[in-house]
Amino acid sequence: MFEKIQEMMVESLSLEKDDIKLESTFESLEIDSLDVFELVTEIEEEFDIEIEDAENLKSVQDLVAYIEGKVAVK
């Protein structure tokens, strides 16, 4: 799952793959709230899930864990 999220972040946010680590925070990657919104929208479409509390996600690890939990429920 991490690799898929990493790939989406590279494509949509023009980040370097090597910069995106599981423990990276959005702040350390200089991802602002608009970028997070765009990424969440893409993830919702890709995985057919709904992310209700994106503002609580602070790191790549938070995002991956949240998505894995949502996908597991389906």
Image: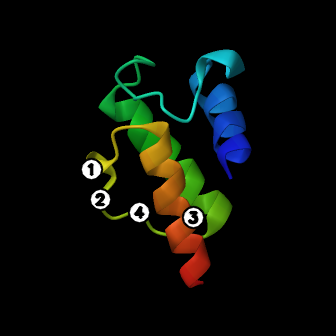
Of badges 4 and 1, the one in the foreground is 1
Q: Which mark is residue 68?
A: 3
Q: Which residue is mark 4?
A: 51
Per the image, label 3 sits on a secondary structure element best described as: helix
Pointer 4 or 1: first along the chain = 4
Which amino acid, mark 4?
Ile
Q: Which mark is residue 70?
A: none
Between 47 and 70, which is closer to the camera in this rendering?
A: 70
Q: Relative to 70, is 74 on the left or the right? A: right
Query: Residue 19 occupies which quadrant of the picture?
Result: top right
Q: Are marks 1 and 2 in contact (CB under 8 Å)?
A: yes
Instruction: Tell me if mark 3 has few (under 14), some (14-19) or many (20+) residues whose alpha carbon lies within 10 angstroms of its own.
Output: some
The residue at the point 66 percent across, 45 percent down is: 2
Pointer 3 or 2: first along the chain = 2
Q: Relative to 59, is 65 on the left or the right? A: right
Q: Are marks 4 and 1 in contact (CB under 8 Å)?
A: no
Q: Which residue is mark 2?
A: 53
The residue at the point 39 percent across, 18 percent down is: 28
Q: CA distance from mark 3 to mark 2?
A: 15 Å
The C terminus - image quarter = bottom right
Of badges 3 and 2, the one in the foreground is 3
Residue 65 image offset from top left, x and y in percent? 50, 57
Q: Are marks 2 and 4 in contact (CB under 8 Å)?
A: yes
Which amino acid, mark 1?
Asn
Q: Is residue 23 above or below residue 68?
A: above
